[in-house]
Image: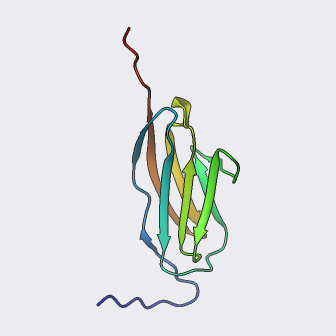
C-alpha cells in the first residue's frame, strides 16, 4: 500500500528521466512523472536551450502528471543533457546519439 500525502504546492518527481542511447535517425523519448497535476512552468531543455513543440520535438503530457519529450530523427549533434523542469523540480539525463559506421 502506497499512500501519498501532499499539499497543493508540494509535487514531487515520482519517476525521473533516464539516460538514453539511440542511433542516428532514430527517436529518443524521455518521460518524467509527477506526483500530481497542476505544476506550473513546465519546460524541457537540451544542453541549456529550451525546447518547443514542433515536428522534430514532440512535447506532451498525460493527466497533467506524465510529461513526455520525444526527439525525432536525431543526429550526432543532438547528444547532450536533457533537462525537465516543473516549478522548482528538476530531472536530467544524458542523450547519446551513436553514429552508424558503414564498412565497404
Residue located at (47% from left, 55% from top): 92
Residue located at (53% from left, 91% from top): 7
Residue 21 higher or lower than 9, as above or below: above
What's the coloring here? Answer: rainbow
Instruction: Please state if 95 lies on the left or on the right of 57 as rendered.
Output: left
Q: Can you tell which quarter of the image residue 64 is in?
A: bottom right
Query: Which is nearer the eye, 48 or 42?
Result: 42
Residue sitting farthest toward the top: 104
Query: Which is nearer the eye, 35 or 63?
Result: 63
Residue 81 higher or lower than 86, as above or below: above
Query: Which is nearer the eye, 67 or 104?
Result: 104
Query: What percent of the width, then of the height, locates residue 71?
Result: 57, 46
Residue sitting farthest toward the front: 104
Residue 31 higher or lower than 21, as above or below: below
Q: Can you tell which quarter of the image residue 39 is in?
A: bottom right
Query: What percent of the width, then of the height, locates residue 2?
Result: 32, 88
Q: Can you tell which quarter of the image residue 61 is in?
A: bottom right
Residue located at (66% from left, 50% from top): 50
Residue located at (62% from left, 53% from top): 58
Query: What percent of the width, then of the height, locates residue 80?
Result: 50, 40
Query: What percent of the width, then of the height, locates residue 36?
Result: 53, 81
Quadrant in the picture for the N terminus: bottom left
Marks counted in the figure total: 0
Amino acid at each position: 500500500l502506497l499512500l501519498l500525502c501532499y499539499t497543493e504546492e508540494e509535487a514531487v518527481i515520482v519517476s525521473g528521466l533516464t539516460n538514453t542511447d539511440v542511433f542516428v535517425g532514430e527517436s529518443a523519448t524521455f518521460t518524467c512523472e509527477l506526483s500530481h497535476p497542476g505544476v506550473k512552468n513546465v519546460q524541457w531543455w537540451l544542453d541549456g536551450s529550451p525546447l518547443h513543440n514542433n515536428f522534430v520535438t514532440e512535447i506532451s503530457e498525460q493527466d497533467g502528471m506524465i510529461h513526455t519529450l520525444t526527439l525525432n530523427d536525431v543526429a550526432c549533434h543532438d547528444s547532450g543533457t536533457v533537462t525537465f523542469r516543473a516549478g522548482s523540480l528538476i530531472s536530467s539525463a544524458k542523450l547519446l546519439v551513436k553514429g552508424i559506421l558503414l564498412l565497404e
